[in-house]
Image: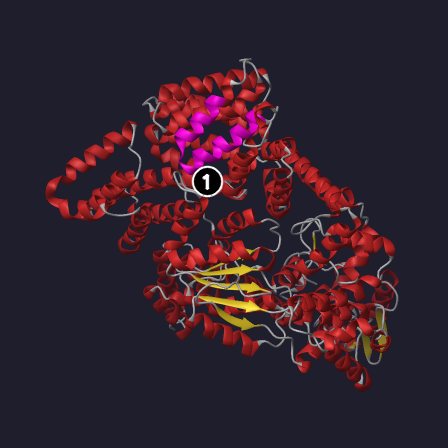
Amino acid sequence: MLGPLRAGDVQLGSRQQRRLLAALLVQAGTVVSADRLIDVLWGDRVPATATSTLHAYVSRLRSVLPGDVLITAAPGYLVRAGTDAARFEDLLAEARAATDPRDALERALALWRGPAYAEFADDEFARAEAVRLEGLRLAAVEDLVEARLGLGESGLAGEIEAHATAHPLRERPVGQLMRALYRDGRHAEALAVFRAFRDRLDEELGVTPSAELRDLETAILRQDTSLAPVRGLPAATSPLVGRLEEVAAVADALAAHRLVTLTGLGGVGKTRLALGSAEAVAARFPDGVAFGELAPVTAAADVLPALATATGAIQQPGRGLEDSLLAYLGSRELLLVVDNCEHLLDEAARLVDAVLRRCPRVTVLATSRTPLGVPGECLHPTKPLPTPDAVRLFLARASAVRPDFRPDDETLHQVTDMCRSLDGLPLAIELAAARIRSLNPADLAARMDDRFAVLTAPRSAPVARHRTLRSVLDWSFALLSPADQDLLARLSVFAGSWTPAAAERVCGGDLDGLSALVDSSLIGIGPAAGETRYTMLETLREYGGALLAERGEQDALRHAHAEYYTGLALRAHSELGGPGQGRWTRLLDAEYGNLRAAHRWAVGRADADLALRLSAGLYYYVLYQFRDEVVSWGETALSLPGAAGHPAYPAVCGTVGEGRTLRGDLAGARDLADRALAGLGDPDDERRLPLQKVLTAVALYEGRLDDCYDLAGVSLRLARAHQDRVRVSEAFLYRGLARTYAGDPAAGLAIAADNLVAARETGNPSLTAWAVYGQAEALALIDPAAARPRYEEAVALATSVRDQFAATIAEVSLAALLARTGETAAALAAFRRTVAAWHAMQVWHHQWTTLRNLGYLLAETGARADAATLLAAVATAGPPAFGTDAARMAETAAALGPDFAAATARGAAMTPDQAVAFALSLELVSS
């Protein structure tokens, strides 16, 4: 029904036969009279044989439909069959009941194959139903957008705009587009969308936008903090049962205190309460919410990198990671959620204390079984659920695993007694409810032995609380088969989620065992899309880890885990350079916790071989995604005993060198590459390639264009000798850019053409984006009109695989081109996006280039005081310009002259973060 009419794989035959079935399906489950069907089939031209012909049509239709789908019932016929339209509406109902409706809405919309009732949509008998279903589809599309906006997704403007354009008089997508543009920093465009819609309504309908949409315009003009998205929070997997008063209490505490810690037993629901509270107060924080999950972190030394990764902070040249994190947070107003502190309490408390002392606008919401002990800490004890809410939780979880579960009064009494005996602990209740799949409540109640008695009267000592939780886990664990018990213990070695293949290789687990544990709710399963991934509650992970330690198996399993993920990283190295870049990037993102655990195991055992192979495998992950924490892994691996003589040592030096280059530490990158090359005597050694690449990139960034060209030539010869297509493309890129930037764009364009051929042979989107970018850079000096679509193509290619670095590089150049060709508004919008992107990535050497180009545009458009301020800030805080950029910098400064001394002095006094904030504010004014 949701597209061309079909009934499974059945061939429906003539148009009249399909028309008959469509008429019955429009009123599925209801008797349609023979007279009505005759009218549908023949209208005003009813033949004398209409009744007998209808019977024949029904008979033929019944012969091809399964079972008793088509039933004779006076005064006509009815169809009883599951339809895609009914399934669609069921999924819409599921979405309305879900905390996160995205999955249900995506599955609902995937059912559509075209317009409802397709060939009959305009016929009288089907028109109303087709219109109704189309209205539901449009609402579902918009509901999905609303859910994605509500969860803080960015970059949605393009798809929302396409929907709004297709339905120009629907107001809801206009509001969604305005919000999406605003969140992407495109404030002027958001307001322009409102004005265009207001004018369209006036011209075509003579009405005005709703008060809600007008209020949204006002909020955008005021830059209302309520428009800030909830960023960094993982989606809740289930509704928050009860806790509404607690959420309000935590929200009040966060308004009065800068550190609020949710304390309580393991499994009592601290994390879920923290998520609900963070969602409730997110609008108070202009820079959003950052969620630092410490559950997968196993060593105190990894707490700092984990929080840096969660917030987006990276290590800056000349600073340690902690100073870099504090400097990054010092200029922001956000809520930092630090979850599961108890197993790393001292280090977590130390870092939280440092954040509170040095970052005056950051508020921290922590969860821990015990207080952090930091001055000014406000404690919020997270209590078990009251019995009525505990019963609601049990019933919800039991119904999820057993849809036919319908408790009568006696059963409800048994459930209430069980929840009371489990003291309202959510984890214990969920574990008990999971057994409803195979046991009725009466049988379950009969298993409440002495091990649960301790839960009715818990003592306050921490050890006693641990024993209380363990008794719940012991009970559930005892219900498993011996093989499943072994598997559950072994799965605790994973940090974060894992795949079926990983479970098989590391733990010897098979699909039956994993399915049994899913059915027991002892492990979870992730979203339906993509590769299956399993998860485990951290409390259960600790429980399984203790069992492994008791058996003496923990070290062997951790080593097997580290070997597996090192092998995965090495395989990713070969795949990331080809057409599988996007898929393998997503996989490594999902496996990040396991990669961190593998690195920590290798370093803890001083296993240079394992640590170096892991870091070498993550070379392209650093290059394309710039995970600064992974760079630090390589730095640590290089310092291990015996590392210098390892075959992977040069590759890891390349990984670290790339990271230091991206950080802006050009001298450190060059020195490291030079030292590593000095240890390779053979000039044809393939291991020289990543080191040559580092030296080539550094030469380009330092303006040594002839050196860059020559170094890339060495790389090109070596790459061809070893048939390394990725390195061939990279060498072409740098040779072409060196020629273009040296004033010979014709030569640069010729080399870029060779590069495009080489890049396309690899199938790698990022390499192809860089090749197209090389063409655009040369064309910008030869044929600017031809350069623009090349820049746009480069941005699109890089964005398709989340290579934000390459995409932002290309958009900076596009912004500069737009400025030179007089498209000032578009240039300002592009500059704003790129300045914000570099700031988020903290890639300062490219930020300075971007800010210089913005300064030139300001000077050319008459904003001379602003230009003087911005260029002075760049000249003071950033590195010197080179080549044509240096000449233009001097020329602009001279043109501004001494008339703007005060503005220049103001810029010279700015910190880097202040310079960025100034630039972003200028764009708001200018646009």
Residue range in magenta is: 649-675
Determine the secondary structure under disc 1. Answer: helix
Query: Which of 145/670 is in front?
Result: 670
- Dot 1 amino acid type: Phe
Total count of labels: 1
In the drawing, does residue 240 fall left or right of residue 542?
left
Q: Residue at x 50, y 33 (%)?
A: 656
Tell me: residue 586, above or below residue 249. above
In the drawing, does residue 531 fall left or right of residue 255?
right
Q: Residue beneath label 1, please?
A: 805
**Quadrant in the rendering for residue 211:** bottom left
Q: Main secondary structure of the magenta part?
A: helix
In the drawing, does residue 608 fall left or right of residue 308?
right
Q: Position of residue 306 (x, y in %)?
A: 53, 50
Q: Residue at x 64, y 75 (%)?
A: 384
Q: Residue at x 55, y 19 (%)?
A: 719
Quadrant containing the C terminus is bottom left
